[in-house]
Image (cartoon, rainbow, N blue to C red):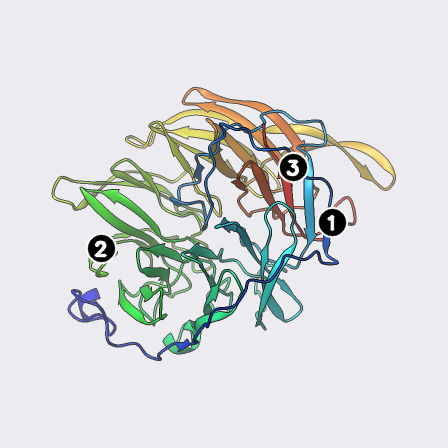
């Protein structure tokens, strides 16, 4: 079925009228915001240092930051720390999940699962004290890994927070109070399967719309009105939902929406969909998905000037497409040897930086030329750590594995998938480790780190391998 014939699109030109089920909308009369309170799960260590008077700061309102590119404009960050790492401000014992915290408008929103509920917690960023909690019933069971918590990162905009839970509940909450503004069940309303890992893609706010990759048999890409939750448009080919998140960027002379789709399907189908964000008009489709049925497309598209970098694991590799003068796109290059599973690349000053690694094993920082795909440099990130095994101290090799990157203050901050934190000075000719610390000994640490107002937020998704600490959200002082 072509995009023009898709049942939710009216000639691909205007907003949609075919909403399968109107959302439940609640009136929100004025109400005082609750005070932040400490909870039993919170352990507060110390107040952070004051911010430098000339420090630049910015919010982190959604997955991969305010521009969805893994960059923050924060400055005056500490580039060295004691052997145990940067000072811990607070830690919160939490439930399972992989979602990042969103920090904006003086609030931190964090989702995690305890028992058969997903909790949406709104915290005070500098203390970890809780303003409110909203809970969503959850019966989800993962087919492949033991972690059945939320994957999708909330988005904060204009006094509201938007959450897409692992079983498809899409909820708009008032940021000050946690009260529900509107809610809808995308899984039931659009007849969506849970795919390999449930709902993973994080919703994106674009103007007055909330964009999400839903996948067939619903619209591949859907836009909902922020104020009401009503379907504004739905478009795209019959591709399922991926684990990657939509990205807004400028290419070919105008702003466009880039969605990497493709989930569970036989035969396997998926790829990049380029759309006009206002109308949902599909402008380009580029097939890009593993030929294996059981595969994950989890790395989000990365804009590199007029180019769009794509990467996926399971034999897919990487590719780059470029906008032409007429606004269409052409394939520049493909590379079957580098494929990202969960992390996304960083584009900075004409170079793509990415962690080419395998969970718990190899890990290297690679610099690529986005124009040609040429590997400019490769820096292996491997070292020895002393660990306690059966009461005996032994040395063991560690690496960043499938580490996540964040570009801040002219450097790369890398969280390895076993809980190591590294500052990396990187250029097209290679990388240098400026600082390293082992924050916790737990694998599957695939949640990207977040930095806001000089504070670093890190999620430990599993219990300690060499200790007894449970999954946690931790706040560290990176103020220089």
Q: Nearer the viewer, residue 342 or 126?
A: 126
The crowd level at tag 3 (other Cα within 10 Å; few <14, some 14-19, many 20+) is some
Q: Percent x, y for residue 284?
A: 21, 53
Residue tagged by mark 3?
A: 48
- Which quadrant is home to the N terminus? bottom left
CA distance for labels 1 and 3: 14 Å
CA distance for labels 3 and 2: 43 Å
Residue tagged by mark 2?
A: 276
Name the residue at the bottom extreme.
21
CA distance for labels 2 and 1: 46 Å
Q: Residue at x 33, y 32 (%)?
A: 373
Q: Is residue 268 visible?
A: no
Q: Percent x, y for residue 433?
A: 57, 24
Q: Nearer the viewer, mark 3 or mark 2?
A: 3
Residue tagged by mark 1?
A: 43
SS for callout 1: strand
Q: Percent x, y for residue 465?
A: 74, 46
SS for callout 2: loop
Q: Percent x, y for residue 180?
A: 49, 71
SS for callout 3: loop
Q: Nearer the viewer, mark 2 or mark 1?
A: 1
Q: Is residue 454 visible?
A: yes
Horizontal side of residue 395 vs 224, given as left or right = right
């Amino acid at each position: 079925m072509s995009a023009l014939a898709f049942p939710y699109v009216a000639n691909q030109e205007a907003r949609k009228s075919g909403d399968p089920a109107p959302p439940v909308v609640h009136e929100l009369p004025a109400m005082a915001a609750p005070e932040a309170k400490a909870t039993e799960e919170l352990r507060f260590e110390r107040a952070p240092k004051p911010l430098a008077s000339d420090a630049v700061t910015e919010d982190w309102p959604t997955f991969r930051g305010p521009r969805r590119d893994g960059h923050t404009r924060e400055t005056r960050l500490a580039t060295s720390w004691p052997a145990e790492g940067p000072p811990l401000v607070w830690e919160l014992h939490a439930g399972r999940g992989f979602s990042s915290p969103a920090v904006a408008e003086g609030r931190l929103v964090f989702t995690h699962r305890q028992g058969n509920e997903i909790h949406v917690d709104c915290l005070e960023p500098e203390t970890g004290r809780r303003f409110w909690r909203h809970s969503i019933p959850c019966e989800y069971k993962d087919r492949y890994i033991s972690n059945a918590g939320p994957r999708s990162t909330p988005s904060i905009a204009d006094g509201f927070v938007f959450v897409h839970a692992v079983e498809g509940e899409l909820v708009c909450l008032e940021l000050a109070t946690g009260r529900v503004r509107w809610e809808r069940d995308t899984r039931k309303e659009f007849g969506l399967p849970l795919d390999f890992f449930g709902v993973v893609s994080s919703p994106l706010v674009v103007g007055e719309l909330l964009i999400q990759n839903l996948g067939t048999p619903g619209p591949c890409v859907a836009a909902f009105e922020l104020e009401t939750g009503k379907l504004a448009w739905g478009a795209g080919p019959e591709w399922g939902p991926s684990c990657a998140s939509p990205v807004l960027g400028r290419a070919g002379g105008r702003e466009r929406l880039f969605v990497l789709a493709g989930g569970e399907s036989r035969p396997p189908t998926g790829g990049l969909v380029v759309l006009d964000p206002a109308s949902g008009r599909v402008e380009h489709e580029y097939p890009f998905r593993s030929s294996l049925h059981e595969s994950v497309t989890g790395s989000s598209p990365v804009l590199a000037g007029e180019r769009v970098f794509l990467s996926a694991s399971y034999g897919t590799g990487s590719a780059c497409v470029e906008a032409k003068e007429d606004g269409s796109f052409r394939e520049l290059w493909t590379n079957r040897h580098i494929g990202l599973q969960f992390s996304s690349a960083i584009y900075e000053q004409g170079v793509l930086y990415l962690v080419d690694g395998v969970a718990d094993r190899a890990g290297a920082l690679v610099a690529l030329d986005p124009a040609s795909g040429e590997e400019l440099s490769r820096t292996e990130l491997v070292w020895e750590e002393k660990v306690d095994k059966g009461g005996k101290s032994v040395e063991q090799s560690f690496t960043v594995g499938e580490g996540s990157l964040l570009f801040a203050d002219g450097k790369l901050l890398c969280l390895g998938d076993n809980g190591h934190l590294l500052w990396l000075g990187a250029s097209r000719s290679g990388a240098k480790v400026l600082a390293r610390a082992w924050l916790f000994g737990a694998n599957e640490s695939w949640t990207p780190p977040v930095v806001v107002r000089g504070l670093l937020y890190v999620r430990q998704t599993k219990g300690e391998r060499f200790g007894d600490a449970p999954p946690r959200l931790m706040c560290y002082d990176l103020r220089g």
